[in-house]
Amino acid sequence: MTIATDPPKESFRLSMLINDTRYRSYTFQAIALLALIVFFSILGNNLAQNLAAAGLNISYEFLGDPAGYDINQQPIPYDSQSTHMRASIVGALNTLIVAFLACVTATIFGVIAGVLRLSNNWIISKLMSIYVEIFRNIPVLIWLIIIFTITANVFAPIAEFRLPRDGSDPERTLIFGMMAFTNQGVFIPKLTLGDSGAFVIYAFLASILGVFGYRGYARKKLFDEGKTIPVLLPSLAILIVPAVLMYFALGRPLGVDLPEMGRFRFEGGLQLRTSFIALWFALSIYTGAFIAENVRAGILAVSKGQSEAAAALGLRSGRIMNLVILPQALRVIIPPLISQYLNITKNSSLAIAVGYMDLTGTLGGITLNQTGRAIESVLLLMLFYLTFSLTISALMNVYNNSIKLKER
Amino acid sequence: MKKSVFLGALTVAGLSAGVAAAGTLDDVKARDMLNCGVTTGVPGFAEPDANGVWQGFDVAVCRAVAAAVLGDSTKVQFVPTTGKTRFTALASGEIDMLARNTTWTFSRDVDLKFEFVGINYYDGQGFMVPSALGVSSAKDLDGATVCIQTGTTTELNLADFFRANNISYEPVPIETGAEAVQQYLAGACDVYTTDASALAAQRANFEAPADHVLLPEIVSKEPLGPLVRHGDHEWGDVVRWTLNALITAEELGVTSVNAEELAGGTDNPEVNRLLGTEGTLGEMLGLDAEWAKRAVMTGGNYGEIFSTNIGEETPIGLARGLNAQWTEGGLLYSPPFR
């Protein structure tokens, strides 16, 4: 019979912090943490002292004062008497508008270019390689300026649309009576809502949900009962009919506001400014090149056996891509795609280079300048961008979880 | 994550909030170099010439201060600043003084903690339009697209002017004057607005200056002058009285040509005090007796600086107007050297 005894308890000695591998890593981490804390408290203290020496204080009261400057693109009503806070929000909305649109178009460019780069057609795949390599390897700021200069010079000067003062006809008129491409931007018709116009929009949005519902029903019917029911025509009907009925039932509350030449430029309609177009396009095409590479990597990550098996079943190559390859590739594509979306949002702060009034242009530019509150404005700016980025990250993670490989 | 970002901000702020205000004069002497903030390039006011040497009306003020303090007008390090970076550069101590057609306003003086030492150019905001547009008054500009430099007082004046006249406009914000001119010439905006002096200066560089007109309205007061950090009064005095010396020199008829001769002694006691042959004004400033003589001999007196850089004989062709001496109906009036 053996008697189990505990090993003799080793007493803790100070030298073990260095010599014992069990404790060594903790020691160094603690030292590093301490050094970091000391470093930042010196910086913070330095800041506080310098601010005090210069007689300055940190205060956000300026956000309530009238901004005093005008902004050209206003998603919400704003004039020069609105507060700096409102100017910041207008800027933030402009950032979100261009970031959202650029994310959508960059994804479209990227998926098309990524798929085509793997095409068997030599010319198409080489053209896509050239696109990716050129756009990926030149800074986005330079693309932004190039595209802005091109748009400002390729489109006709707005002066040619003006009514000459001698009463003759202008050199150029609206295309189809509703659009104009000028060097001050593109003017297009604007949808106007009457009193009850919003209901038509709601009906249309509800119809979109209805279409998804119907398609789900058709699929269920196919899987459960093996019956196919027509999808395309009923979908179209669900999409259009309720909105049209609502439109006439409410007395045609929607209208179209056409651009019309004023003394200097088009009045009415919607103006897509050159700066907005340039920023949107530059961000899309630049980030699209990165997304193309993500897509290509994702597709190549799907085993070749998958496409061969699908081909053996007799699927056409388009359906192989849509039904077999892309769904599997998405779980590889989505995580790097999230960081591309974040890049678009952050790169949109280059807007001031072409005079687009985004958040950096209003809060980080004019407001900072006119109030001289640099530290406050920059901190607030960081908070805005951090919020945007984390929100996009969170949303995309939800989507990623929904499509990633489900392990059962 | 939030914490590290906040601390990062503190780092930036801590590094940029910069040095305490006192002792700039000693710093400049010890460094043997004056750091002077100027524009990134406005013809006539501050622009490097073909040899890369900075020339211009604002540059001359920097050179005069360097001559007065260091005895050598070439000991200036010119730091180009934009409308957005100029105040940070000055507040952080990166530059010792800012001579960059900057408008003296209450909030810049009081709230931003700067000290404007005087006015070297009385300006006002004007509008330039292509003559083909057929506009004769700024009040006819309802609906026009206006190019404007961001981060300047002109931006606020513009908003005020159009609001006061109840007309609308489309602002196109642009970072620097050069880009604004490019946009304006490309027709991306119908109107370019900034200080009238800068408009005249930019127009002089156009291919066809005659195709563009300056509208008669001057919509604001823009007193432009050099500024220093608040709180360092010794240094503020040096810059202020160097500027005053240039103005007084013109009033008393002291020029770069005759300063040496007049320094031998004259019957006019104020000239003698200015040139250091009488009294101890230089010593009171912490400089030597000949500081003002050197300042004047650098680029001449105020009138000489004006006519070589922006006067009617230059391509910029500005008239003295408000910037004439008070004895000739202008606003230039230096306190006496006594």
Image (cartoon, coloured by chain):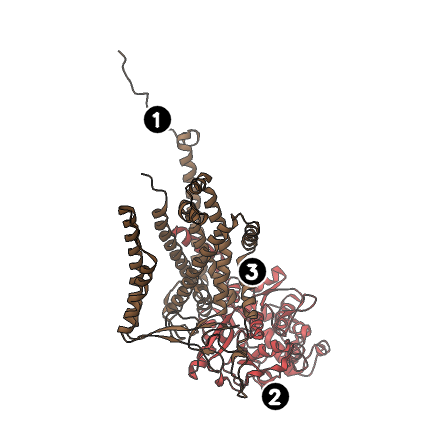
Chain for disc number 2: B
Is B159 above or below relative to A138?
A: below
Is B139 above or below relative to B236?
A: below
Going by the image, does A154 lie left or right of A298?
right
Residue A242 point in image, percent of width and height: 28, 66
Give the residue type at disc 2: Glu
* Mark pair 1, 3: CA separation: 65 Å
| Quadrant occupied by the C terminus of chain B | bottom right
Residue that carries the numbered disc 1 in the rendered image: A11
Chain for disc number 3: A
Q: Earlier in the sequence, mark 1 or mark 3?
A: 1
Residue at 36% from the left image edge and 55% from the top image edge: A391
**In front of the other: A249 or A356:** A249
**In front of the other: B254 or A141:** A141
**In front of the other: B245 or A131:** A131
Q: Callout 2: 10 Å neighbours few (<14), some, many (20+)?
A: few
Residue at disc 1, secondary structure: loop
Residue B123 point in image, percent of width and height: 55, 80
What hue represents chain A? brown
- Residue B190 in sight from this viewpoint: no
Give the residue type at disc 1: Ser
Q: Quadrant of residue B176?
A: bottom right
Is B115 above or below relative to B331?
A: above
Residue that carries the numbered disc 3 in the rendered image: A142
Q: Callout 3: 10 Å neighbours few (<14), some, many (20+)?
A: few
Residue B328: image tag: 2
Residue at 37% from the left image edge and 48% from the top image edge: A400
Residue located farthest toward the top when viewing the structure as drawn: A1
Residue at 67% from the left image edge and 65% from the top image edge: B52
Give the residue type at disc 3: Ile
Q: Quadrant of residue A157?
A: bottom right
